[in-house]
Amino acid sequence: MSRASLDKDPTEVKGMFDEVAERYDLTNDILTFGQVRIWRAASRSALGVSPGDRVLDLAAGTGTSSADLADRGIDVVACDFSTGMMSVGKSRRPDLAFVAGDATRLPFADASFDAVTISYGLRNVVDHGSALAEMLRVVRPGGRLVVSEFSTPTWAPWRATYNFFLGQVLPRVAKLSSSNNPAYGYLSESIKDWPDQEGLAADIRAAGWRNVQHRNLAGGIVAIHRARRPEGESA
């Protein structure tokens, strides 16, 4: 069993997700006590797309978020660099369009999507600033970005409780449900190392996005950041 380090070497990250692919969605449900489904619905609502819109679901994994969009008439492309995750997704939803791709070098033309979304995957990219710039490039002027990611609880007692969960509870629960327990050690460490809400908002602005806003879920355990590509500007 393998796990990535906080250097986030792409080969290590890909290998880690390939190994957890088969039980990834089940483990997510267990570790979040089912809250991941509520968070997914909130991300979809924040995206604000309509039937016929073309959406890039980046770091789509097994395609759970992509399937939710496709079922509502959205023209969605599920993109991930873990062939293991995509293989599981294709077996479950052969109707979905899966494309292998690196978030820092997306295999899509400029301005080819109405919106782009990434859920709990930006934190795993070796250079998330470059990934945000690539997302800007492939979205049309005026198009939307939604980033859903683990973040920092805003209330100190809740933050302490959450940190205890990450350090003590999550590894024990993951050991019972996951095919690769060390990978969930990386999950805990990468969450603690990730920028808080304002820090990520600043990174999004630095990549060229505008109208950046965020909304906390579960007291800040998760934050949904929204932004737009400026009208009339090239990426």
Image (cartoon, rainbow, N blue to C red):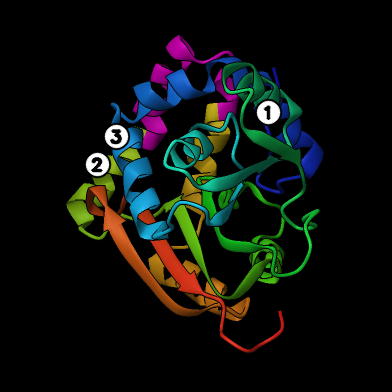
Query: Does residue 200 appear to the left or right of 151 in the view shown?
Result: right
Residue 131: x, y in percent? 68, 61
Location of residue 151 (image quadrant): bottom left
Quadrant holding the C terminus: bottom right
- Tell me which amino acid carries mark 3: Gln
Q: Is residue 176 magenta?
A: yes
Quadrant holding the N terminus: top right
Q: Which residue is mark 3?
A: 35
The answer to whether residue 222 shows anywhere in this view is: no
- Tell me which amino acid carries mark 2: Thr
Q: Earlier in the sequence, mark 2 or mark 3?
A: 3
Q: Which residue is mark 1?
A: 86
Mark 1 crowdedness (10 Å alpha carbons): few <14, some 14-19, many ≥20: many
Secondary structure of the residue carrying numbered label 1: helix
Residue 172, compared with residue 82, is above or below; it is: above
Secondary structure of the residue carrying numbered label 3: helix
Residue 52, compared with residue 3, is above or below; it is: below
Q: Which residue is mark 2?
A: 161
Secondary structure of the residue carrying numbered label 2: helix
Residues under labels 2 and 1: Cα distance?
A: 34 Å
Confirm or deny contact between disc 2 and disc 1 (CB under 8 A).
no
Confirm or deny contact between disc 2 and disc 3 (CB under 8 A).
no
Q: Earlier in the sequence, mark 1 or mark 3?
A: 3
Query: Does residue 45 appear to the left or right of 75 in the view shown?
Result: left
The answer to whether residue 168 shows anywhere in this view is: yes
Main SS of the magenta part reads helix
Q: Give the label, 2 or 1, closer to the camera.
A: 1
Q: Is residue 74 magenta?
A: no
Residues under labels 2 and 3: Cα distance?
A: 17 Å
Q: Nearer the viewer, residue 5 or 26?
A: 26
Magenta range: 166-183
Residue 164, compared with residue 141, is above or below; it is: above
